[in-house]
Amino acid sequence: MAQDLVNTLADLKEQEAIKIAKDRLSAGEDPFKIMEDARKGMEIVGKRFSDSEYFIPDLVYSGEILKAVTELVKPKLTKAAESKKLGKIVFGTVAGDIHDIGKDIVVFMLDVNGFEVHDLGVDVPAQKFVDKIKETGAPIVGLSGFLALAFDSMKETVEAIKAAGLRDKVKVMIGGGQMSDEIKNYTGADAYGKDAMAGVTLAKKWIGAS
Amino acid sequence: MEKQWEDMSSDEKQEALFAKWMSPEGVEFKSPEAKRLYKERATRIKDALQLKKKPDRVPVFLIPSFAPAFYSGLTPREVMYDYEKANQAWKKFYLEIEPDAHFGCVAPGPGRFFDILDYKLYKWPGHGVPNNTTYQCIEGEYMMADEYDALIQDPTHFFNTVYLPRIFGALEPFKQLPNLTTYAEMYGTGITFFPYGLPDVQAAFKALLEAGSEALKWMGYFGAFMKEMPELGFPAGQVGYTKAPFDILADTLRGTKGIMMDMYRQPDKLIEAMDAMLPFWTQKGVIEAKMGGCPIIFIPLHKGADGFMSDEQYKKFYWPYLKKIIQGMVDEGVFPFIWAEGGYNSRLEVIRDLPKGKTAWLFDIVDIDKAKKALDGIACVAGTMPTDLLAVGTTQKAIDHTKRCIDVAGKGGGYIMSNGAFFDEVKWDNLKAMVETVKKYGVYK
C-alpha cells in the first residue's frame, strides 16, 4: 500500500493517488507517513525530470496531484510532525519582470526537495531581496527572469546584496528565459541553472546535502 | 488573359504573391539606388527562402521588439503612445543599421486603445510596468476548464461573449449579447435584439467605437511606414502572423498551467478545440498575405519548445495541428516563416515532415549544426544570434557567432542570419557588427 502511493504519484495517476491517500487516512494511518510517501513519489518525479523522461507538464501535473493529497492530509498533521528543512532560500523574479511560471516550478521543486523557500513573488526590487536575506539568514538566493531586461535587474540585485555586506554570506543562482553562463558572469551571480532540477542540484551542493 | 486565383496551383499562387512583393503596387522609389537595393534585397531573401537558387549572399534580418525605441533614446511608453515618434524611431533603426528587410513598426501598438478598453491581459509600459519596460502578458485562465464545448461549438460567439469580456474590462457587458446565428425571421426580433439597448451594453459599444477610431489613427501611421520603407529600399520581411493551434489555447485562453492539466485530464477536448481553431487561423494568414501583397507570414511558436512537453506529447498535441496550419497556408500560396522561440533541439527530426522549400524556420536556441543537417533541402534556416550575446557579449563574440552561423547554416544557401529572439535594448555595436559581418563574410562566391 505504501509503495502504491509512491508509485501512483510518480506515474502521475491522479485519481488513484488521491484514492489511496483517502483510504489510508480513513484506515487511521499516521498522516505523516502518507506525506512521507508523497514526498518519495515527488523525488522520483524529480529524478525522471532530470533524466529527460518527464518534462514541464509532468512536473506541473505532479504538483497538482501533490496539492490534492496535501489538502487531504494536512488538516490531520500535527505541527511537530512536519519534516525538518534542509536549508533556507530566498527566491523571486527580479524587478521589472512579472513572469512567474518558471519561478513557481523551481520554487515548488525546491520545496518538495526539503528546502524552506521564501518566495518574494514577481517584479521584486533589489532591496526586498536584501531585506529578506537579512531577516531569514538564508544562505542561498534564486533570481528568476524571463526578459532581457532582467539581465540588468539581476546585476543590480547582486550589487545590492554586495553593498549590504552580504555577498560572501550567500550563493546566488539565476535562471529563466534568455539566461546563460554569459549572463551569470555579467550579473556576478555564482551559477546559472538551466531548469528546475538544476536549481535543486545547485542548492543541495551549496548546503552540502548532496 | 491572366490566370484567376482559384485556378492557380499552390506554387503559382506563391509565385504570384512573391511577384507582387518584388514589384510593390503604388510604391514610388525615392531614388534609383533605393529601387536597386529593394530588388537586390527581395531577390536575395526569396532565393534563400525557396531553396531553388543560392542567393548572392546570406540575407540578414533584424526583428526587434522595442529595440528601435531604445536606439532613439525613447521609452517603450513613448512609442506606444506617440505614433509619429514610433515611426521615426523604427525608420532610423532600419536606415542606420541596414538589414535586408524591415518588419513594420507593429510592436508599439496603439497605447490609448488599451487604455480605452481597459485591457486586462497585459501590463504595458506606464500601466503596471515601468515606462522603460516592454509589455508583459498576465498568465491566467481566460477560458475555464469546463468551457471547451462552448468554444468548440461556436468559436466566434465564444470569443465575442466570453473571451473578449474577460480580457477587456470595458467590454464586459458583451457577455449579454445574443448569438445572431439564431436570428432568422421577423417573429421574435425584439427578444433577440433588446440587449443592444441595455445601457451598459451601449456604453461598451461606445468604448469600442472610440477604441476603433484610435486603432484607425494608428493604422494611418503604420500604413505610411509600410509604404515608405519599400520606397527607401527595404522590402517587408513579413506582413502578418498566425499561431500554432496549441499556442492559441495555451498562451491566452487556458494559460500554461491550465493547458498542461488539460493534456492529462481532457486531451480529447483539447484536440477538438484545436481543430475548431484551424480554419480561422489558417484563413487569417492567407488574408494577411493577400492584403499585404507578400507571401511571408510569421508563426511564432511558444509552448512546444524543448522541455515544455515530451516528444510523445509534441507529436500528439502540437505538431499535427501546426502542420495543418502550415499546409493550409502553403496550399494558398503563403510562405510560412516559423519562429521557434526558446529551445528546439529535440523537435528537429519531427519538423522535417514538411513540403520541401515551402517554409523557413527561425531558431532562437538551437544546435546550428544539427538544425542545418535536419532541414537541409527541406526548409530555409534562420537565426540564431542569442539575446545574451547581443546584450552583454563582446563585439568580437558577436562577430565570431555570426561567422560560425554563416559557415554552418549558410552552406549552399537556404539560410538567413537573424536575431534569435525578440529584443529590446542591446549593445548597438554588437548588432551593427552582426549585420556588417554578414555583408562582408556572407557573400557567396
Image (tube, rainbow, N blue to C red):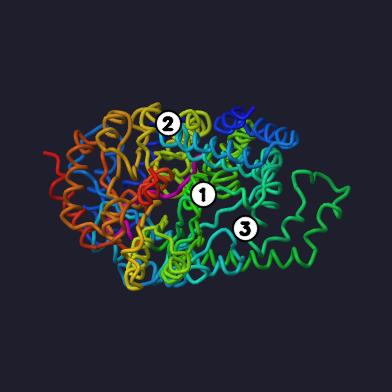
The answer for which chain carries disc 2 is B
Residue that badge 2 annotates: B10
Same chain for mark 3 and mark 2? The answer is: yes
Q: Earlier in the sequence, mark 3 or mark 2?
A: 2
Q: Viewer-proximal residue, A31 or B432?
A: A31
What SS does tag 2 mark? helix
Q: Nearer the viewer, mark 3 or mark 2?
A: 3
Of badges 1 and 3, nearer the viewer stands: 1
Q: Main secondary structure of the magenta part?
A: loop
Callout 3–callout 2 Cβ contact below 8 Å: no
Residue nearest the observer in this picture, B129 or B90: B129
Regarding mark 1 in the picture, which secondary structure is present there? Answer: helix
Give the Cα separation between the discs numbered 1 and 3: 33 Å
The amino acid type, in three-letter code, at marker 3 is: Ile
At which x and y percent is residue B170? 66, 65
Q: Is residue A151 magenta?
A: no
Which residue is under mark 3? Answer: B167
Give the vertical position of B212 relative to B244 (above or below). below
Image quadrant where residue B197 sits: bottom right
Mark number, residue A111: 1
Binning the other alpha carbons within 10 Å of mark 1 as few (below 14), some (14 to 19) or many (20 upward) gives: some
Q: Position of residue B59 (x, y in %)?
A: 24, 46
